[in-house]
């Protein structure tokens, strides 16, 4: 840490100008361990009450300090801080608390009628005042989660070229092949613990958005910090750009990515492999790499290829599966029976559908000690060609084959519902309006309380709306969706639809991996996360028809999930951080980032 005398020396010697900045890594960089999570620089090891200096890693003052989003406090700089850091005259004379700044910004955000305007306002805030951004998001999570992530992030990705202002992550394209390790070293942070990476080929339910898919890693990592408590400095968003097959983007003069069709085969595999190797070399064995929105044909292959050698997690396959399983486990208190007593029908047999199906089968196998091959027979899938059955096995993709059961071919979803008679209907098709009135009515005729999950994002791609599910089932459906829906009034009753949002799982899951020093992801860790989330649904939630707890408690939820995941990692011998803490929940909470302003010397 630089003393006031040394700082004046830097200023007078010309090493540093009053409005300038000069990084002095050799003198200032230091790393320490605290609460099991590696901390970098003085700010991260200080408590909220301690006085700290904003230039432990780089010397900044005056105008430059106001342009540094990690340290900028805007009008919350005190009189003493304005004197000490050459801010006099650079700010209006008023002093505002962080709480008053937050109140003002929420008033501004609520005036915007277009969701994308709110998204852009939040991104602007993140780029100029990081702590205020996260304070705002944490304190207003239920209101702002749909703004910074689904459904608004889908529109943001579609228009990313037009709204792009300042790079928020690393772009690794085919132009960087052979020098990806050098590119990683261009990122200013050295201690990275979580990377969210996409190639933009299957963004939500919107298809190939190429390089503009960067909005997904940026959004996910914002939630890792706000909901899971990881420090922003340890999070790295990455987009791998191998081109796009989206003709509209290729013909868009403002498109920000490579202007050619997607590379495939060996060229694609070599680039991804170089990236994975470089990440491990640069950041170590325990960096978590989360795959996001890769197309089916790559998602399964990448997860299978790198699971034995890297700490990898696919949120579309594993995160979605874990959050849906949690909802199903909680819903048993409303519909009765055990998981093994129910029959499941999926519309959609891609990453999400097969991932959910496999985790359900694993949980039933765990509960009943039945072989996995047997428990899979409770689960049926419908894809674009109809019911997945054994007579189609020759033409099926590898990941669908375990779900090809003996049955006569069936083309449509309605006929499949009538034939299979499921108690649970799950939509992961990415195609909107596919749970028609006839389909929902058929589910309601078979079940007293049909469980209907319309998981596709964004809202426009949801298989049905909450209002449709409740109305067509005469108020008997237990409903949850991927994107949020407003409460629905039917027959003088108010139904509050749940949201099967991956944000319930991945922030706490990632935190659990990090605090335990896990080196690999195991299916039992996902089951532990699901069981932990389900256990946190209270009776007051069930009384409203909810199968998920409220997001207002998300940091507590994440801490509990992290503790269960870490406990399972220790149990399986996957944890490397020793000794094991006695109270894992308290330990997880102690590791969480706080967005409250620090006081500067």
Image: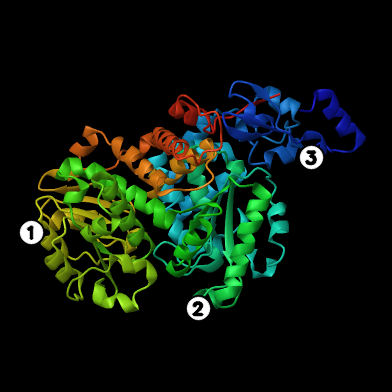
Q: What is the CA distance from the residue labelled 2 to the residue labelled 3? A: 45 Å
Q: Position of residue 246 (x, y in %)?
A: 49, 75
Circle 1: element type: helix
Q: Which residue is mark 2?
A: 247
- If you read the primary sequence from the N terminus, does the residue marked by circle 2 or circle 3 appear first? 3
Left or right, residue 535 beside residue 119:
left
- If you read the primary sequence from the N terminus, does the residue marked by circle 2 or circle 1 appear first? 2
Q: Residues within 10 Å of mark 2 (few under 14, many from 20)?
A: few
- Using the rendered view, name the quadrant where residue 107 is placed: top left
Please tell me the numbered disc located at residue 251: none
Q: Residue at x 90, y 32 (%)?
A: 12
- If you read the primary sequence from the N terminus, does the residue marked by circle 1 or circle 3 appear first? 3
Circle 2: element type: helix
Front position in the image: 464 or 559: 559
Q: Is residue 126 above or below residue 372?
A: above
Please tell me the numbered disc located at residue 445: 1
Nearest to the eye among marks 2 and 1: give it.
1
Q: Residue at x 45, y 66 (%)?
A: 202
Q: Position of residue 580 (x, y in %)?
A: 51, 29
Left or right, residue 120 beside residue 188:
left
């Amino acid at each position: 840490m630089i003393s006031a005398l040394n700082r004046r020396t830097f200023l007078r010697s010309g090493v540093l100008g009053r409005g300038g900045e000069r990084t002095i890594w050799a003198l200032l960089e230091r790393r320490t361990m605290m609460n099991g999570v590696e901390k970098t620089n003085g700010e991260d090891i200080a408590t909220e009450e301690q006085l700290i200096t904003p230039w432990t890693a780089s010397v900044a003052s005056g105008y430059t300090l106001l342009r540094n989003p990690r340290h900028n406090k805007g009008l919350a700089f005190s009189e003493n801080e304005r004197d000490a850091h050459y801010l006099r005259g650079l700010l209006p004379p008023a002093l505002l608390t962080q709480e008053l700044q937050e109140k003002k910004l929420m008033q501004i955000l609520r005036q915007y009628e277009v969701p994308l305007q709110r998204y852009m306002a939040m991104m602007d805030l993140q780029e100029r005042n990081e702590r205020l951004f996260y304070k705002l998001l944490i304190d207003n999570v239920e209101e702002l989660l749909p703004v910074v992530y689904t459904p608004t992030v889908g529109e943001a990705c579609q228009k990313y070229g037009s709204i792009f202002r300042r790079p928020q992550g690393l772009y690794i394209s085919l132009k960087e092949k052979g020098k990806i390790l050098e590119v990683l070293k261009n990122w200013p942070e050295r201690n990275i613990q979580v990377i969210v990476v996409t190639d933009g080929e299957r963004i939500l339910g919107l298809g190939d958005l190429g390089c503009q898919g960067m909005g997904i890693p940026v959004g996910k990592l914002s939630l890792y910090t706000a909901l899971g408590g990881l420090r922003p400095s340890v999070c790295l968003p990455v987009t791998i750009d191998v081109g796009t097959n989206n003709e509209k983007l290729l013909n868009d003069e403002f498109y920000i990515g490579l202007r050619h069709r997607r590379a495939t085969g060996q060229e694609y595999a070599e680039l991804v492999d170089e990236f994975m190797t470089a990440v491990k070399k640069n950041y170590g064995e325990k960096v978590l790499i989360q795959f996001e929105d890769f197309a089916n044909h790559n998602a399964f292959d990448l997860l299978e290829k790198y699971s034995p050698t890297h700490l990898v997690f696919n949120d579309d396959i594993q995160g979605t599966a874990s959050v849906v399983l949690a909802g199903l486990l909680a819903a048993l208190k409303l519909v009765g029976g055990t998981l093994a007593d129910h029959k499941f029908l999926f519309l959609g047999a891609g990453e999400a559908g097969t991932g959910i199906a496999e985790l359900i089968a694993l949980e039933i196998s765990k509960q009943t000690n039945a072989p996995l091959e047997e428990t899979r027979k409770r689960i049926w899938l419908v894809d674009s060609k109809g019911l997945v059955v054994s007579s189609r096995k020759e033409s099926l993709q590898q990941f669908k084959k375990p779900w090809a059961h003996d049955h006569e071919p069936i083309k449509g979803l309605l006929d499949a519902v009538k034939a299979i008679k499921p108690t649970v209907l799950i939509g992961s098709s990415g195609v909107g309006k596919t749970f028609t009135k006839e389909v929902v009515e058929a589910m309601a005729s078979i079940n007293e309380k049909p469980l209907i999950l319309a998981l596709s994002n964004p809202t426009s791609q949801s298989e049905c709306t909450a209002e449709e599910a409740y109305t067509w089932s005469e108020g008997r459906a237990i409903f949850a969706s991927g994107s949020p829906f407003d409460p629905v009034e039917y027959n003088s009753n108010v139904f509050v639809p749940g949201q099967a949002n991956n944000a319930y799982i991945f922030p706490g899951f990632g935190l659990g991996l990090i605090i335990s020093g896990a080196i690999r992801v195991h299916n039992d860790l996902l089951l532990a996360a699901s069981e932990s989330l389900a256990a946190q649904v209270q009776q007051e939630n069930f009384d409203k028809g909810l199968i998920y707890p409220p997001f207002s408690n998300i940091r507590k939820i994440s801490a509990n999930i992290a503790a269960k995941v870490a406990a399972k990692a220790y149990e399986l011998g996957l944890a490397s951080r020793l000794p094991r803490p006695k109270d894992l929940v308290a330990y997880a909470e102690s590791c969480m980032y706080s967005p409250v302003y620090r006081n500067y010397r």
